[in-house]
Image (cartoon, rainbow, N blue to C red):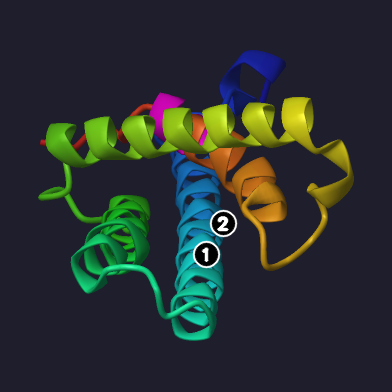
Amino acid sequence: MTTLDRRRSSATRYGRVDTVRRWASRAGAVALVGIGIAHTAVNGYAYLKHGGGSLPLFLVFGLGVSVLAFALAAVAWRYGRRDRRAGGAARIAVAVAAALLCLTAVSVLRSHPSVIWVPLGPGPWSLLGGPALALAACCPRGRTRG
C-alpha cells in the first residue's frame, strides 16, 4: 500500500468539519443561554428594586431580549445537530447572533474592559459565544451521499 492509497476520503474531512461545527454551535448556544439568564436576572432585579419603570418597557427590553437570546440559542443548538432540516435560515440566524455577540464584546471591551469577566454582564458570554457562533456559521455543511 502506497502513500497515495492512504489518503483520507472527503467524508472523513467533512466529518471533522461537522464535529467542529457541532461543538462550536453548542458552545455558542450555551453562551446565548448564559447571556439570556444574566439579562433576565439583572433587568428583573433592577425592575423590582426601582419600581418606577414601566411594565411594558421591562417586558419588551428586559424579558423580550432574553427570550430572543433563548430562541437564538435553540436555533444554534439545532444547527449544530446533524439535522438536514436546519439549513440556510438557521445558518443566517447563527451568523446574525455571532455578529451581535461580537459587537457586544467589542462594545464592552471599549467602554468597560474591567467588567469583561463579570458573569452577570454580557462580557464573558459574548466573548465566548461570538467567535464560536462565527466559526459554526462558517463551517460548511457535510455532503450527502447519494
> Residue 30 placed where, x, y %?
52, 64
| Location of residue 96 (image quadrant) | top left
Q: Quadrant of the N terminus?
A: top right
Q: Which residue does the numbered mark 1 point to in the structure image?
A: 30
| Residue 39 seen anywhere in this rendered image of the structure | yes
Q: Quadrant of the C terminus?
A: top left
In this view, 120 is above or below 85: below
Q: Relative to 40, is 1 on the left or the right?
A: right
State the count of labels.
2
Q: Nearer the viewer, residue 98 or 110?
A: 110
Residue 64: say if magenta. Answer: no
> Residue 20 placed where, x, y %?
55, 43
Q: Relative to 104, is 14 on the left or the right?
A: left
| Residue found at x 44% / y 76% | 47
**Crowding near the residue tagged with mark 1, few <14, some 14–19, many ≥20 C-alpha atoms within 10 Å:** many
Q: Which residue does the numbered mark 2 point to in the structure image?
A: 27
| Residue found at x 75% / y 30% | 111
The residue lying furthest to the bottom in this view is 48
> Residue 116 placed where, x, y %?
79, 47
Task: Kindly identify the amino acid type of the residue bearing the numbered disc 2.
Answer: Ala
Do the CB atoms of the residues marked 1 and 2 lie less than 8 Å apart? yes
Task: Kindly identify the amino acid type of the residue bearing the numbered disc 1.
Answer: Val
The residue lying furthest to the right in this view is 114
Residue 137: say if magenta. Answer: yes
Magenta part of the protein: which range?
Answer: 135-139
| Location of residue 63 (image quadrant) | bottom left
Q: Secondary structure at mark 2?
A: helix
Tell me the CA gap for discs 1 and 2: 5 Å
